Amino acid sequence: EPEVTQTPSHQVTQMGQEVILRCVPISNHLYFYWYRQILGQKVEFLVSFYNNEISEKSEIFDDQFSVERPDGSNFTLKIRSTKLEDSAMYFCASSGTGGRYEQYFGPGTRLTVT
Amino acid sequence: GEDVEQSLFLSVREGDSSVINCTYTDSSSTYLYWYKQEPGAGLQLLTYIFSNMDMKQDQRLTVLLNKKDKHLSLRIADTQTGDSAIYFCAEISLPGNTPLVFGKGTRLSVIA
């Protein structure tokens, strides 16, 4: 069964450093998403991406965040200058078209900013 | 804004039924979802229901939707220890590939 994959599973970085989180969505899906979950809190939407551009973003997704689809398979989230409060689990998701809106999630990347 | 609320904990005995409840505020919610998160794992889509349905059954899972009260429930029949996980209710308010709004999740503990 096709699945969303994410790398790395755990990333530790120092405050102020740049990180890139990687995702490979399900191959025939066209919509891609990033969500995050701070420990003990709700899963929160960050950004959605379709047709090589951002289709929607939340207030959390400020100028320090960016997304890219550098090739036909990868979807990345970059955090330019990490802060302590960026420590969270980051989930990538993808969904199809044709009335199928279910979003399938990857296993997540745990980001720890020290 | 939209909000989704769930009780945080539920404990049941193995073999009993579990009922996990969820309320939402957005009356234009169109699709409602249940996701399962096992320790250290991602979010697994369990089932979903469209807002014009009252009930959906899928093997041991039954989803009930009361649109008037904006209440959604997930019933797990014959609960097993492998069902121990956090269960998230989520909704989208427009038909389409729009962001999910999640509840905080209900931690289900199954006692053998």
Image (tube, coloured by chain):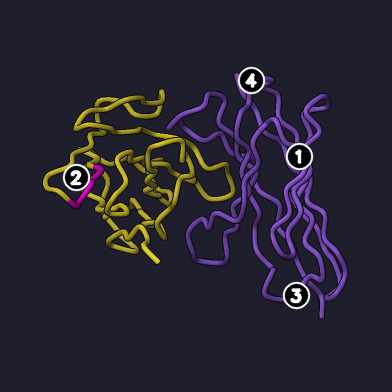
Spatial separation of the CA atoms under disc 4 and disc 2: 39 Å
Dot 2: element: loop
- Chain A: give its colour: yellow
Q: Quadrant of the N terminus of chain A?
A: bottom left
- Which amino acid, mark 3? Gln
Q: Earlier in the sequence, mark 4 or mark 3?
A: 4
- Return the x and y of residue B62 as percentages of the image width and height: 76, 54
Upstream in sequence: badge 1 or badge 3: 1
Q: CA distance from mark 1 to mark 2?
A: 41 Å
Residue marked by disc 2: A18
Using the rendered view, name the quadrant where residue A86 is placed: top left
Discs 1 and 3 share one subunit? yes
Q: Which residue is mark 4?
A: B28
Identify the disc placed on residue B80: 3
Subunit that carries the residue with mark 3: B
What's the residue type where badge 1 is placed?
Leu
Chain B shade in the render: purple
Q: CA distance from mark 4 to mark 3?
A: 35 Å
| C-alpha span from label 1 to label 3 | 22 Å
